[in-house]
């Protein structure tokens, strides 16, 4: 434990020194680091695949379920997405140094706000090695240094990606310690990272509910968090059936192991008998297990009985809770009771109902006639995301560049004094 504490303190000290250099670097320099990293990743596909294969093999030996293995896998398409994400982030406007809200005060001074980096950002995440690149790229573009602590199941993949990041930073003349991937899998490293306010300015945990609850409870550093992704799609009585079927199936089956995957489907009672059999057939073809309320099971006898726990569940698996509700009021009541405030969607052709849903559903992303799978920094045009925050203070929803900055007041005078 003493060795881990000393190691993490050294990582923190190096990050703090690097943060000062990154903060004063030019936009061009940071962009050059991102683009150089993209080139290194592209040239290192074989090494990345070999490292990832080690993690997948170990994961299977340790009994990781299919959803976890899916999150862990670095497919060629996911490497392509990492590379494209780096290029998109490099192309984004640099928020650092932007001065806004300038106004003259009665005294004659000018007062405004300047956007500045947060400093050192600690990221704690599980399974998905592509998070290493997403988090590093956004933190770097926003002028921050970052300390990345991935899950033990992805240690080989993360270290391989770390080597690419180090090369990219070096080619741009930035300190290699601007992005540090923690080398130990000892859980004590997490405890040390979240208790170093002298070195770390904010913690962003990405992972299961247990991890995030622990971080939120024990951290001595501010936390940007989301606890889980219990996402809903509500099919309104005014929905286009073809559109509803397409969106609902995509929201659940496009990928199971993500926080923006639909976990509960709500259907208006007025159309349940017509549309539920079609939905059940489509989900059966995809191998999705349905767990339904009594009204659902009366229409779809093959559905298992849903319990109270199912309405709270983030399955991250081919399991879907289905409930028949009494119209829009019933859907909003259910969502605001059981939702994790992540992402919820309504399928309707009625503008008034859509507006009510947008106004009354209290989630970080609320959608109309779109799959919940779009709740993603890449899809929102942020280039990538560091996480999806369900907090209401500082950052909410996909956290991109602006969420990784703060503002300070700036004042311009010409020899002004206060009388």
Image (cartoon, rainbow, N blue to C red):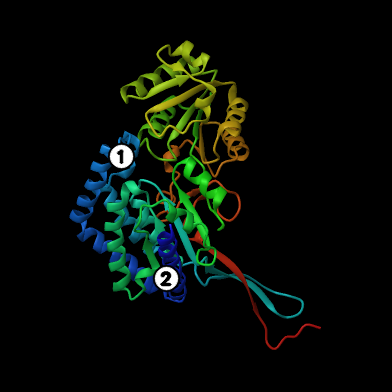
**From what the image shows, is residue 178 above or below residue 362?**
below
Mark sitting on residue 271: none
Residues at circles 2 and 1 in contact by the CB criterion of under 8 Å: no
Measuring 47% from the left and 58% from the top, which residue is drawn there?
192
Exactly how many numbered labels are in the figure?
2
User: Who is closer to the viewer here, 388 or 146?
Assistant: 146
Residue 240 rendering spot, x and y as whole percentages: 46, 27
Picture quarter with the C terminus: bottom right
Q: Which residue is mark 2?
A: 14
Measuring 62% from the left and 35% from the top, which residue is drawn there?
356
User: Who is closer to the viewer here, 371 or 239?
Assistant: 371
Residue 318 rendering spot, x and y as whole percentages: 37, 28
Q: Is residue 215 visible?
A: yes
Element marked by disc 1: helix
Relative to 171, 226 lies left or right: right
Q: Is residue 93 visible?
A: no
**From what the image shows, is residue 220 above or below residue 235?**
below
Q: Residue lying furthest right in this view?
A: 419
């Amino acid at each position: 434990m003493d060795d881990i504490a000393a190691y993490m303190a050294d990582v923190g000290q190096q990050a703090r020194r690097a943060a000062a250099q990154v903060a004063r670097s030019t936009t061009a320099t940071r962009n050059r680091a991102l683009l150089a990293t993209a080139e290194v990743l592209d040239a290192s596909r074989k090494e990345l695949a070999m490292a990832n294969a080690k993690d997948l093999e170990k994961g299977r030996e340790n009994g990781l379920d299919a959803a976890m293995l899916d999150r862990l896998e670095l497919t060629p398409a996911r490497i392509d997405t990492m590379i494209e994400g780096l290029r998109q982030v490099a192309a984004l406007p640099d928020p650092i140094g932007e001065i806004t809200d300038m106004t003259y005060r009665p005294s004659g001074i000018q007062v405004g706000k300047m956007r500045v980096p947060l400093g050192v950002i600690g990221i704690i995440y599980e399974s998905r090695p592509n998070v290493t690149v997403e988090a590093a790229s956004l933190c770097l573009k926003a002028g921050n240094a970052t300390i990345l602590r991935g899950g033990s199941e992805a240690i080989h993949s993360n270290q391989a990606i770390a080597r690419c990041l180090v090369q990219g930073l070096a080619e741009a003349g930035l300190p290699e310690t601007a992005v540090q991937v923690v080398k130990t899998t000892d859980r004590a490293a997490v405890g040390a990272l979240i208790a170093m306010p002298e070195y770390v300015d904010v913690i962003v945990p990405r992972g299961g509910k247990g991890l995030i609850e622990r971080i939120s409870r024990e951290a001595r550093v501010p936390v940007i968090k989301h606890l889980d992704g219990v996402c809903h799609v509500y099919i309104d009585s005014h929905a286009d059936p073809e559109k509803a079927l397409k969106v609902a199936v995509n929201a659940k089956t496009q990928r199971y192991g993500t926080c923006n995957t639909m976990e509960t489907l709500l259907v208006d009672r007025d159309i349940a008998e017509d549309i539920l059999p079609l939905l059940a057939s489509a989900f059966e073809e995809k191998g999705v297990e349905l767990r339904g309320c009594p009204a659902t099971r009366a229409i779809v006898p093959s559905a298992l009985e849903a319990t109270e726990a199912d309405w709270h569940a983030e399955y991250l698996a081919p399991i879907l809770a289905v409930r028949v509700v009494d119209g829009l009021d019933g859907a909003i009541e259910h969502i605001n009771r059981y939702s994790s405030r992540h992402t919820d969607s309504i399928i309707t052709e009625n503008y008034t109902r859509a507006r009510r849903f947008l106004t009354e559903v209290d989630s970080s992303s609320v959608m109309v006639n779109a799959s919940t799978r779009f709740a993603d920094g890449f899809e929102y045009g942020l280039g990538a995301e560091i996480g999806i925050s369900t907090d209401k203070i500082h950052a909410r929803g996909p956290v991109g560049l602006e969420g990784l900055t703060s503002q300070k007041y700036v004042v311009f005078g010409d020899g002004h004094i206060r009388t």
